[in-house]
Amino acid sequence: MSTEEASRRWNAVTGPLFLAAGAVFAVLGNPVWPVFLVLGITFLGLTAGPEKPARRSGAQGPDRDR
């Protein structure tokens, strides 16, 4: 397993854990829950990697006429 793959797996595990912790803190009324929300979203975003998203078939390209 490469280091990059291990990092993605780690991020895929910790992201939902941070989101769950944030949800628990939000229910308990603890004001620190937004920090866990941001961490969870960040870790889940890092699981996607640096690839460019696939272009949608219905998306229009830039106007070259102008």
Image: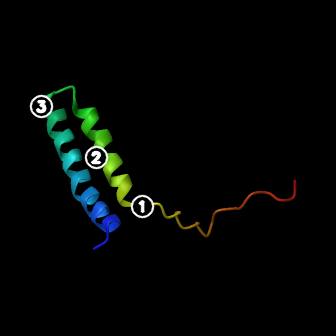
Residue at x 22% of width, y 29% of height: 32
Cβ–Cβ below 8 Å for labels 3 and 2? Answer: no
Distance CA(mark 3)–CA(mark 1)? 33 Å
Name which quarter of the figure residue 47 lies in.
Answer: bottom left
Name the amino acid type tagged 1: Gly
Name which quarter of the figure residue 29 lies in.
Answer: top left
Name the amino acid type tagged 3: Leu
Give the answer, above or below, for where 26 lies relative to 21.
Answer: above
Distance CA(mark 1)–CA(mark 2)? 15 Å
The residue nearer to you, when weighing 2 against 31, is 2
Distance CA(mark 3)–CA(mark 2)? 18 Å
Residue 40: numbered disc:
2
- Residue that protrudes farthest toward the bottom in the picture: 1
- Residue that protrudes farthest toward the front in the picture: 3
| Residue 23 drawn at (x, y percent) | 19, 40
Name the amino acid type tagged 2: Gly
Q: Nearer the viewer, mark 3 or mark 1?
A: 1
Q: Which residue is mark 3?
A: 28
Q: Which residue is mark 1?
A: 49
Per the image, label 2 sits on a secondary structure element best described as: helix
Residue at x 31% of width, y 62% of height: 8
Per the image, label 3 sits on a secondary structure element best described as: helix
Residue at x 21% of width, y 25% of height: 31
